[in-house]
Image (cartoon, coloured by chain):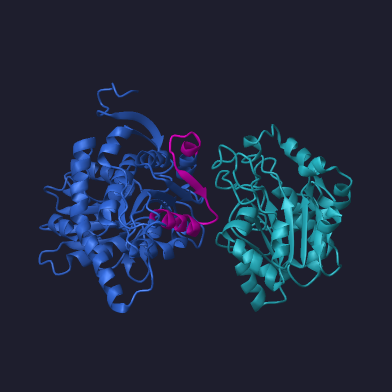
Chain colours: A cyan, B blue
Amino acid sequence: MARDLNRYLRPGVSTTPFCPGCGHGILMNIILRAIDELRLNLDDMLFVSGIGCAAWIPSPNFNADTLHTLHGRAIAFATGAKAFNPQLKTMVISGDGDLASIGGNHLIHAARRDTDLTVICANNMIYGMTGGQAAPTTPAGAISATTGGGNPWAPFDLCRLVIGAGAGYAARFAVTQPLELKEAIKEVLGFTGFGFIEVLSPCPTQYGRRNDYGAVTDMLEDLRRRCVTADEMKRLTGTERKDRILTGVLHDERNERNEMETARA
Amino acid sequence: MTSQDPVTPARHVREMLLGSDAVAHGVRLCRPAVVSAYPITPQTHIIETLSEMVDRGELPAEFIKVESEMSAIAACLGAVSAGVRAFTATSSQGLAMMHEILHWVAGARLPLVMVNANRALGAPWNIWADQSDSLSQRDTGWLQLYGETAQEALDGVIIAYRVTEALRVPVMVMLDGFIGSHTMEPLFIPDPGLVDDYLPPYTPVDYLDPDNPLTLCAATAPDSFYELKKGHARAMERAFDVLDKTFAEFGDRFGRRYAAVETAGTDDAEILVLSTGALTGTVRVALDRLRRQGVPAGLLKLRLVRPFPRWQLRHLLTGRRRVIVLNRAVSYGAGGILTQELRAACCGMADAPAIHDVIVSLGGKEVYPETIEEIVVRADELSPDESVWRP
């Protein structure tokens, strides 16, 4: 955490809840930086999270109303709070296992209804807090505590999922793209409607050590190499594209942007 | 150590295992065809170990890591409907999420075994030992077996498959979160052949088969519904006898004897302490110390909560002065759940002892032998009808 952002933390919060090398601390910093640059008042905001490592980003750390809900139910709780108090800037911050697995139904229906929520999904591709079991975002072939022989299933593309469900805005960035990510968070906080940002965040403790990432920096380097924009993707050969991850504001109905199509063009 | 070790019973291996791993070995020996689960602390080790066993080929089963506990129990419901043995494990919120399908499995009279690592239910969040999760599912029609040790959890799974397949009533096997699941204990793992002799391959009665199509769980008219529920209730009554016989046969074959209610030092005891799960180990220490001080107190360890062993308990309570029920789950507005059960069981008993309702621990609040000793020593001061909460 940058020192100047400490004023957004609840008094008494002094240590990070995250493991060494976890990307969630970077994301925590970026979210607060976006809020700081927008000069938003935390008293006008509500942060809702579910269960899992990412749910600890706002709760209890942010000095705002934070609601730590049941596993999977963050979006449903946020929808209720927002319905009662539409003035609240309501942000859901939770993980891939929480939002896309046990809570997947709430995610697609909030997207379909264009519920006025900012949903930030910290995707570390695994269930970190319970010890590294395969999630619906775990890459095919990856080793986890429940897929010792390699994950037999393909992962969700979370942005495609919410776009398919009707989301007007979907972006994907890694924590290794902090400035672009911060701008996307500011953009979503600036409009009314459902905005979804998938944030790729490394989990060295549960994912990296099982999948041949020798060091924390290997995971960050890997994200830096693999995360490309649509323009960069276009310049790559078919083989090169295979292990790259398309990042950017992938879908934005308000501004008629669609990077998914750009990348394919 | 090997089975040559004189303390190891014949056809067993002695091991030092976590409670959760002990459960996984019990499941492996029962050869389920489908294991489906979702991670939740403190149960997760059970399914992780099972998934490793599947990967290594030690357990030739389909392992399905699903997207929620509701999916896990639903996948098991599907598997047993298709005529195979299945298994799932969960804890706390996960068990609460399964609630709807727990009723469905039991109502469909499907044989299924699950393990629940007892943990508190939120809010607020708490991951430690507490029986609110399983005791709040006591009306779902499942048989409930509680264990004190990892050995009881391992053996309990094997016994549970025999019982569920005999009665067509699903069985929930409990061990304590962390104290049971995350503590290592020396225990005996039976040889696969010994378990195979005790638990033959599962032969389903009615199951989904394209060559012989049938409809399961179709809409039912009131009279038929009532008859089916009567059948379920009667199966629960038969469970006492089936369980006694199953325990007895298990004792003969494996050398470990169990009962629905187990006792220690009760022969001349005026005061009884009723306990369940891992807490019982602490109670044993406290009662041993009290015995040495001349306090005539004995232990009732409740293994079976559904069906509730009312006749055994009435028999054991006859002629006693008081019984102290140690609860780790509360029905708010009615007191400790096990106390209510015991009071209902003793209703109409002419010489029933005073029944004291003690809420001894919730959410993992530590219980020391001294805690129990003090409660027993000062039993005269305990209210006969109001719940006693610790200061």
Query: Which quarter of the image is occupied by the N terminus of chain B?
Result: top left
Percent across and percent down for residue A262 are 86, 56
- Residue B4 sits in which quadrant? top left
Looking at the rendering, the stretch of residues picked out in magenta corresponds to B52-80
All told, the count of numbered labels is: 0
Q: Is residue B265 magenta?
A: no
Left or right of B174? Residue A166 is right
B316 or B34, nearer to the observer: B34
Left or right of A141? Residue B318 is left
Q: Is residue B67 magenta?
A: yes
Left or right of B345? Residue B1 is right
Q: Is residue B219 above or below residue A11?
A: below
Q: Residue furthest top?
A: B4
Q: Residue at the spot x=69%, y=53% of the render?
A: A122
Residue B170 can be seen, yes or no: yes
Left or right of B140? Residue A205 is right
- Residue B236 sits in which quadrant? bottom left
B331 or B61, nearer to the observer: B61
A65 or B150, nearer to the observer: B150
Percent across and percent down for residue A244 are 78, 44
Q: Residue at the spot x=14%, y=50% of the render?
A: B269
B112 or A43, nearer to the observer: B112
Q: Residue at the spot x=47%, y=43% of the render?
A: B45
Query: Which quarter of the image is occupied by the C terminus of chain B?
Result: bottom left
Percent across and percent down for residue A217 are 75, 36
Percent across and percent down for residue B359 are 34, 59
